[in-house]
Amino acid sequence: MATKYADTISPTTCLICNTSNEPDALLCEQCDAPMAIVQDAVAQERRPQIVSVIGESNVGKTVYLGFLLDMLAQRAGDFEDVPKGAYSVDLQQSVISHMAQRQFPPKTPMEADQWYWAYYQVRRRQPNAQWVDLIMPDMAGESLAAEVATPKTFRVIYNLLNKSVGLLLLLDAALAANGSTQPDFFAMKMLSYIDSINSAKGRKRIDTPVAVLLCKADHCPECFDNPTEFVKANMNRTWNLCQSRFDSVAFFATSVVGSLGYAVSDDQENVTPIPLHTALRGVIEPFEWIIGQP
Amino acid sequence: MDQVIFTSVRSPSGVGYRIIAASPSVNRKEKAEIIRRAPSHASLDRPDPDAVAMLAFPIAEDRYCVGFSQHAGKEHTARGGERVHTHFVILNMQDYEVFEMNPLTVHAALNAVVGGRPQLTPPPILEQLQLRAAPQSMHVQHCRIAPTCNVEAVLQISLAMLQTQRLLVVDPLDGHDLLDQTITCLPAALRHGLAVSLGLKFSPSRRLQLCIVRPDKAQTRRTVAGQNTRTFDAANPPERKSSRYDAWLDLIKRRWEEGKLTDIKRLATDITEDACPETLANIAALCFDIDAVAKAPPEELARLRTKYADAATAQTHPVRLLHQFHDAAQQRAQELEQPHPA
């Protein structure tokens, strides 16, 4: 994946929305993206590329992204990475430390200034392999849903998706396997939103690579055997839309949690899922595929 | 009045924070504005189950939105923290005037209806909400000065609002009295455009003009950097800098020290169209002259009467104040005509 931009970056101009900010601003005044990203990009003298992790609320975006970053940090899949700034490690740390205590990480708020942003340099551990600068924000699923329902409600999401060079679309395979149409409809909405963004650019078909991740696949192991067939069978509407409009789509089965326990207490009406241990499957492969796209 | 409920529930159409119910006449643009600003997970300043907060802002098409936020049990995904539930009411300007254009008055009325009773399974289409202002807030006579309030803090926050600055106020108290007194001192012309929160964590994405928070948020202060938002410590207000609003603020301070907050409220409520520095300075000068005329010697009385002889025709001052001046001048003239007791 080659760096597309070679123009100079201003230390006060937001990379996401191009708004000019005060020199001491920590967040962009317009879209709330952290200005540290810009300052780190300036230090690199090249413009980073955005890979967005998108999906419905509670599908597991935060957990997936946290483990992906942790695997990269541990040089899984022959990758090596360098976080640019301590803020980039916050998400990884939050996810790993919560899971180590057998808790899911806290819910991501809708307020964009509360989102985690990770800025990493990644490359394969091979001679002459090039570094790729990647920005991966952890957006709230509710904000994504609101933006898709009424475009420009959250300008930051519009700008992020508009500038993304790759998308990781997370869908709840466990729900779909149980007969729920919700993941299928959410994916359709999301893809049609991306389609409309790209149509505005005059493109007939979308060439942005989209990795569709079938999350919580440990609940439906048949996913791992053939994710494409799983989507055809259980999320047929999404499959059809991908065929009609997207040039570069791949399907992956993903699982992070090995086994779950469920806790209840007398004073609590909700059942609390407890991640008893982690068993990572299919976490790095979608990222590897995105990185490998031309 | 239209109403909207924003919270996190699981339903066949989705999970997480969203508008779960709304009156039919709330349009798409208004809903988008509410979603953009509404508090989501862990947004209340206090984590306690009984914490409440207020969010108020002007919304599209000349309407004003006030939200009552409260916790509503554990969030259903059980990923830590309380579920935040916000019940919004949308008022047209006529309705808002009934509540003296004070979002806290609306909030108090909402509290009486929904406080402690968050709706998690409302019908998707809500009927109009009948809200009634609490009786004590309907009469200016009941206006009181909160003993905990620092007049300098109120004046400086008022000044920032008059100058359309954005302010993050750190108040060691709950901030309610401080906000109430500040709104009381604000001309009505400004109140309908005020975007304000109380009891919510500061979030730049809410785009508020005034945000009152507790003082233990060092992170908040860092977030303010570069956001065109000034941090203001209500417990230790800095010295007030001179401005074009000095006459108006001096009047407020004098009335405050005299214990006459009712006068300020009445004055501020009357200023519905123009709150520019010149207008406020004219009003303040007239009020000072009304004070002066009560003890004016004959020459001074004559000078003041001449000064305001044509004011009614020129329409430079509120009619009510001019009547008050002329009544006071008449009374003073009668006093001066009476022979002094030996």
Image (cartoon, rainbow, N blue to C red):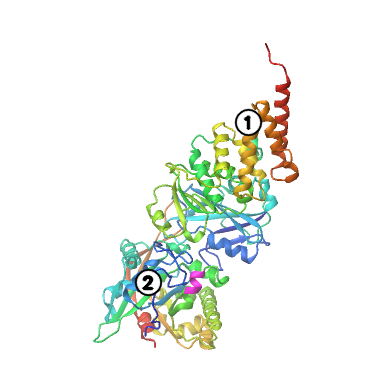
Q: Residue B296 or A138: which is nearer the viewer?
A: B296
Q: Residue A263 in the image: state x and y as whole percent.
A: 40, 59
> What is the spatial separation of the Cα atoms under label 2 and label 1, in whole angstroms?
71 Å
**Relative horizontal placement of residue B312, taking residue B224 as reference (left or right):** right
- Residue type at numbered disc 1: Ala
* Chain letter for mark 2: A
Residue A262, magenta (yes or no): no
Give the answer, above or below, for where A45 lies relative to B170.
below
* Chain letter for mark 1: B
Q: Residue B342 in the image: state x and y as whole percent.
A: 67, 11
| Residue located beneath label 1 in the image | B292
- Closer to the camera: disc 2 or disc 1? 1
| Mark 2–mark 1 CB contact (< 8 Å) | no
Q: Magenta region, mostly helix, strand or loop? A: helix
Q: Residue A232 in the image: state x and y as whole percent.
A: 49, 85
Disc 2 crowd, CA 10 A, few/some/many (<14, 14-19, 20+)? many
Q: Is residue B109 visible?
A: no
Which corner quadrant of the image does residue B77 belong to? bottom left
Q: Which residues are magenta?
A: A155-159
- Residue type at numbered disc 2: Leu
Which corner quadrant of the image does residue A33 belong to? bottom left
Q: Which mark is residue A65?
A: 2
Q: Residue A163 in the image: state x and y as whole percent.
A: 46, 78
Q: Give the farthest residue toward the top.
A: B342
Residue A157, magenta (yes or no): yes
